[in-house]
Image (cartoon, helix red, strand yellow):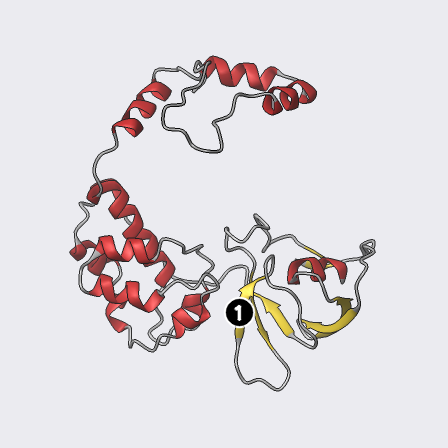
Amino acid sequence: MSETETKKVTVDADTIPIFIMGKKYEVPESLTIMKAMEYAGYKYIRGCGCRGGVCGACSTVYRKPGDYKIYTGLACQTVVEPDMYLTQLPFYPALRADYNFAELKGNPEEVFSLYPELFRCVACNACTKVCPMDVQVMDYIAQLKRGDIEAAAETSFDCIQCGLCASRCMGELPQYHIAQLARRLKGAYLMPISEHLNTMVSNIADGRFTDCIAKAKAMDLETLKKTYTEREMEPATGEESWTPKEATCL
């Protein structure tokens, strides 16, 4: 991100002081950290993704006045507090193992070989405490040390790859990369084969959707918007007996 001259947005709220990377700003108290930084004149170049709390790009570290504790959160979700002192970590360097996924079999020994630092974990639980998604990071590391890939994949399911766990790890583990490997192994090798998925892959390979995609790409913007808003939608009740009237592009 960079500090730049931007037009201030009018917000109907009292202002509070916050410190962004060492500099004091007055911002409306109702804003999230991300919106407050933009209000203060910062333009996001990196560290901003979905703005919905699921991509992990805007991990933020901050302290509160008179409090020794380091707090963490996502800038797009965390609301500013008076005199908070913050900085962002849009990327934290962590080693990711290099492997050919197609050559793996889904065995615990593969995880051990690719990430031997797994056994450097000292069970301090700093990783769990720093996680903005409340993932039990230490628990899935322990599950992997026991060779339980399926349990680790389930425990780490809500991980958004922000990397804050690695920033606080005494054993210097790249926990989020290890967890991603566990989820990939479970999905590819440990779960039952999905016939629906195989059917869809075959349909794509056979070119079933080629004409539909070409037609959509050829539409002007207004026609595309109209087609989207008038599309047939599955009932909100999720009726199992429902089937679309037109399934050419499905």
Residue 97 seen by the camera: no
Percent position (x, y) of residue 70? 53, 77
Where, quadrant-wise, is the C terminus in this rendering?
top left
Residue 63's place in the image compared with 87, above or below, is below
- Horizontal side, residue 119 vs residue 63: left or right: left
Depicted 87 relative to depicted 50: above or below: below
Q: Badge 1, how many Cα within 10 Å: few under 14, some, many 20+?
A: many
The one nearer the camera, 137 or 24, is: 137
**Residue at (63%, 21%) from the top-left corner?**
224
Q: Can see residue 164?
A: yes
* Placement of the N terminus among the 4 image quadrants: bottom right
* Residue indicated by mark 1: 72
Residue occupying the point 50% across, 51% down: 54
- Vertical position of residue 114 compared to residue 228: above or below: below
SS class, disc 1 = strand
Horizontally, is 119 left or right of 166 in the view? Answer: left
Which quadrant holds residue 4? bottom right
* Residue 86, position as x, y percentages in the image: 62, 71
- Location of residue 133 in the rendering, given as x and y in whole percent from the top left corner: 46, 61
The reply, left or right, for residue 15 in relation to residue 19 is: right
